[in-house]
Image (spheres, rainbow, N blue to C red):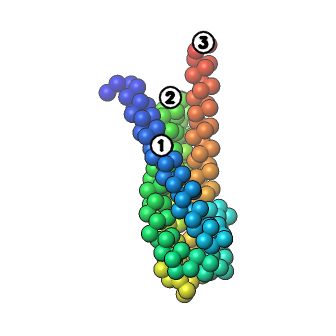
């Protein structure tokens, strides 16, 4: 196998996954999540990075109404089942792409771990949202708290993974410039 094969392949995967992830994200933010916000007058669960309480969830679900809750399940959730894997692929392959060219791979390993973790927390969040909506109006506080915790952990791990992807890219760029000057 050629020495540059892995970086070239993960670079292509990162680019394709980024285009797909950005497309799905754009549709969610500009269509499905925007629609849910308009009909409820509140931010959807997915867009609350600091979480929510059982009373917040009840207020939101009541404001959504039957049609809004059905829309969440039939439009937003299917899109949000695609997005986590696409984002995790984008971040992990970007980190591998730049990190594979660097002598110290700790950031690369941590970044991939965080990227995969952000996707897993997003899936847990999605399953929790489905459980919350399907159980309405009999919300179990522990389900709301667990789902809210997944939302917070998704937000934290995604922010850290994106930050490490950017940092890895900057370090690689700096290293490449130093190599050009040498």
Mark positioned earlier in the residue sequence (2 or 3)? 2
Q: Using the image, determine if residue 85 lies above or below residue 73.
A: above
Front in this rendered view, residue 129 or 37:
37
- Say whether residue 5 is visible: yes
Q: Residues within 10 Å of mark 1 (few under 14, many from 20)?
A: some
Residue 4, quarter of the rendered image: top left
Residue drawn at 57 percent across, 22 percent down:
176
User: Where residue 180 sits in the image (x, y, percent)?
Assistant: 58, 15
Q: Using the image, determine if residue 27 lies above or below residue 11.
A: below
User: Where residue 24 sits in the image (x, y, percent)?
Assistant: 48, 52
Residue identified by numbered label 3: 182
Mark positioned earlier in the residue sequence (3 or 1)? 1
CA distance for labels 1 and 2:
23 Å
Residue identified by numbered label 1: 19
Q: Using the image, determine if residue 69 lies above or below residue 119.
A: below
Q: Nearer the viewer, mark 1 or mark 2?
A: 1
User: Where residue 74 sits in the image (x, y, percent)?
Assistant: 44, 69
Image quarter hosting the N terminus: top left
User: Where residue 39 sits in the image (x, y, percent)?
Assistant: 60, 71
Mark positioned earlier in the residue sequence (1 or 2)? 1
Q: Nearer the viewer, mark 3 or mark 1?
A: 1
Residue drawn at 45 percent across, 50 percent down:
86
Residue 148, quarter of the rendered image: bottom right
Q: Is residue 3 left or right of residue 170?
A: left
Residue 40, quarter of the rendered image: bottom right
Q: Residues within 10 Å of mark 2 (few under 14, many from 20)?
A: some
Residue drawn at 62 percent across, 32 percent down:
170
- Say whether residue 124 is visible: no
Q: Secondary structure at mark 1?
A: helix
Q: Is residue 40 left or right of residue 1?
A: right
Q: Secondary structure at mark 2?
A: loop
Residue identified by numbered label 2: 101
């Amino acid at each position: 196998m050629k020495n540059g094969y892995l970086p070239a392949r993960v670079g292509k995967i990162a680019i394709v996954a980024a285009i797909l992830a950005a497309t799905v994200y754009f549709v969610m933010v500009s269509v499905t999540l925007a629609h849910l916000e308009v009909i409820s007058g509140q931010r959807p669960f997915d867009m609350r990075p600091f979480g929510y309480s059982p009373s917040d969830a009840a207020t939101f679900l009541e404001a959504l109404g039957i049609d809004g809750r059905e829309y969440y399940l039939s439009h937003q959730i299917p899109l949000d089942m695609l997005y986590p894997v696409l984002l995790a692929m984008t971040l992990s392959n970007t980190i591998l792409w730049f990190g594979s060219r660097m002598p110290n791979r700790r950031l690369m390993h941590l970044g991939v771990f965080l990227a995969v973790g952000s996707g897993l927390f997003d899936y847990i969040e999605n399953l929790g949202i489905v459980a919350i909506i399907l159980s309405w109006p009999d919300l179990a506080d522990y389900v709301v708290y667990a789902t809210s915790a997944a939302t917070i952990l998704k937000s934290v791990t995604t922010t850290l993974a994106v930050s490490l992807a950017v940092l890895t890219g900057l370090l690689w760029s700096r290293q490449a410039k130093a190599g050009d000057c040498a």
